[in-house]
Amino acid sequence: MLGLSLVPVPRPARWLALALWVAGFALLLGGRLELGGSFRIGRPRERTEMQTGGLFRLSRNSMYLGVFMTLAASALYTLNPLVLVVAALIIAVHHRIVLAEEQHLQASFGEAYVAYCRRVRRYL
């Protein structure tokens, strides 16, 4: 176990962590692929289309949810308090990014985005 854990990790927890990691990575990759040409890092200068199909029918932030799940899987797999703290900090920072992105999307897409937010939850 590479000495990452301070306590022995039960085998069922390892399998759960692996399943959580695979699901999280699938959400991250699937969300990225579904964004297609609308994927941007930072604020786009050009106009993009609002994506509401596929995974985005279930979660407005499937990519972030995938990242959160992989971080949770890492903490569960190692049971290392440092990994848990770092994962929690990364999740907190990314949640703030999500909130800022939502403001930008509402300014860009107006009522269409507000209606989308009423239909689809932020994460799950």
Image (spheres, helix red, strand yellow):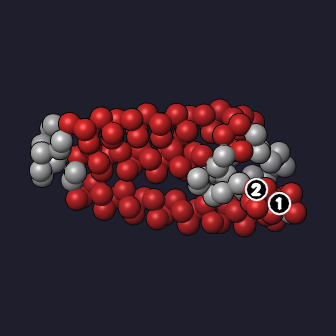
Decide: is 29 above or below 3: above
Residue visible at 55% across and 50% down in the picture: 64
Type of the residue with mark 1: Ala
Residue visible at 76% across and 61% down in the picture: 118
Residue visible at 52% across and 34% down in the picture: 26
Q: Is residue 83 left or right of residue 68?
A: left
Quarter that holds the N terminus: top left
Q: Residues within 10 Å of mark 1 (few under 14, many from 20)?
A: few
* Residue at which label 2 appears: 119
Tag 1 secondary structure:
helix
Q: Are discs 1 and 2 less than 8 Å apart at CB? A: yes
Of residues 36 and 119, which is closer to you in this image? 119
* Residue at which label 1 appears: 115
Type of the residue with mark 2: Arg
Decide: is 4 above or below 115: above
Residue visible at 23% across and 46% down in the picture: 78
* CA separation in Å, label 1 and label 2: 7 Å
Q: Is residue 93 left or right of residue 112?
A: left
Q: Is residue 102 left or right of residue 114?
A: left
**Which disc number belongs to residue 44?**
none
